[in-house]
Amino acid sequence: MLAQAWDLLVQRWDFFRGLLVEHVEICLVAILIAIVFGGVAGILISEYQKAARPTLGVVNFLYTIPSISMLGFLIPFSGIGDATAVIALTIYALLPMVRATYTGMTNVDPAIMEAAKGMGGTRMQTLVRVQLPLAMPVIMSGIRNMVTMTIALGGIASYIGAGGLGVAIYRGITTNNTAMTIVGSLLIALLALVVDAVLGFVEKRMQMRDAKARRTNRRMAIGAAVACGAVALGVGVSSLVGGSGGTINIATKPMTEQYVMGEALKMLIEHDTNLKVKLTEGVGGGTSNIEPAMESGQFDLYPEYTGTGWAMVLKKKGTYSEREFGKLQAGYRKLGMSWVGMYGFGNTYGIAVRKDVAQRYDLKTYSDLARVAGNLRLGAEADFFERADGYDALCKAYGMSFGKTMQMDIGLKYDALSQGSVDAIVIFTTDGKLSRADATVLRDDKGFFPSYQCGNVVRDEALRKHPELRAELKKLQGTITELDMARMNYEVEEEKKDPKAVAREFLKSKGLI
């Protein structure tokens, strides 16, 4: 497996290098902010002891909030992308920074402070020239711990559509590509170790007794901080500049077929037009996070499914059928969006059980399953348990109640089924693994699941600004069957092909590039 990971790293170095740069940028901004605000807070509470306990209590409380929950809290305020990731990482970085600064400042020998005052030093002079330098070894130790933790935690950024090496980890899990997950994880670990070693060297240099060496190191540290700040500012400015004008921001959900379609959209648009595409892949939460970002203008386009749009976006009740597509389109136009370019395939929900379970209970339909569901364990992704047309509605329609339910990532459900961790799983009809799985797909005898035809949802403002975009999206109309999509999913998940390569082969086979 390590050999496969190495081969993948070599073959796709440009991809991983880009993620590495993004990871450094996101973490660097969070670290700099935490150093400034955490350091100031630590100094202030060391000066005003009454504020120390409540301040540390608040910071401790924020630190205990799970990272996924923190992202969920922040998304309504700061949206999808790098900004939310930076805020979350900064919050988690504050505790070690505040605590280290406070500890270092309060542990300085009071006799030394009194001597400094006796020599005529003002409070500010004593603070800057005596107390802070003496506290610096403890503060630097806190910075090392904070930086290492922030780099490791930076992998969560990919969950909300930000960049970084977490993209490789999350994509590897979603597409069943263990080598990609290993490469992403090892690069994060290596980055953390390298940075920790560099900071360790700086810390040792700062502990030198030679006054000249200490002054030189301080100047180097200040220069490095200024340089890092300039780099971060430059990245931010370039991001703002690059995101305007002829750039289309495309988002995809964390599903194999969405990775393929995202790459196909990017290639097609950039091949035939002067537009540039910024592709944000695998946004955690899918529709729940992408659609609000579409309304706010963060994204211009994403592949969506009709049944999902009907239930989750328009909040319509009842089972969706394609006869109601006109109503669906009208509802989206009220939100300033349109469906353009229906691919031709549907990715409908289904339920599959292990073959031995199907044989044991003679299961052929959902109604058969309802009779024995209390003895079985059902596995599904988080989204299914929250949808209006998901788990609760299914149980109500068929009068079933499973003995146990397990929430899991889309890419893990077939492994869980084969290993016996669950007895039944919620599937998609284009799952690449379905054709090879030791599973029986049951028949939806009451027609519970709605139609989920795939198409592109695009902001009307983007269509008005770039009229050529509509023509490009229409080129994809009716080009993919469910069999085509299942085959492409299988190539990515089982044959370990790059989604970009699979998308390119598809576009070439259709004469689109």
Image (cartoon, rainbow, N blue to C red):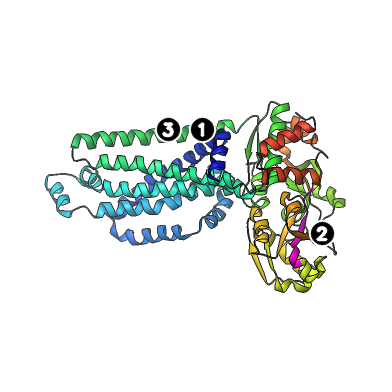
For the record, the magenta segment spans 346-357
Q: Which residue is drawn at 51% across and 55% down?
A: 67
Q: Relative to 212, is 78 above or below?
A: below
For mark 1, give the secondary structure: helix
Q: Which residue is drawn at 75% across and 35% down?
A: 506
Is residue 356 on the magenta stretch? yes
Q: Mark 2 points at which residue?
A: 319
Pointer 3: what residue?
230
Q: In which quarter of the image is the C terminus?
A: top right
**Where does the image place residue 486, in percent across and percent down from the top left?**
76, 46
Q: Mark 2 and mark 3: span between their CA atoms?
A: 54 Å
Compare residues 206 and 11 and report the one nearer the observer: 11
Q: Distance between the residues labelled 3 and 1?
A: 10 Å
Residue 500, quarter of the rendered image = top right
Q: State the SS at label 2.
A: loop
Q: According to the image, label 1 marks what residue?
A: 237
- The image quadrant that residue 45 belongs to is bottom left
| Amino acid type, mark 2 | Thr
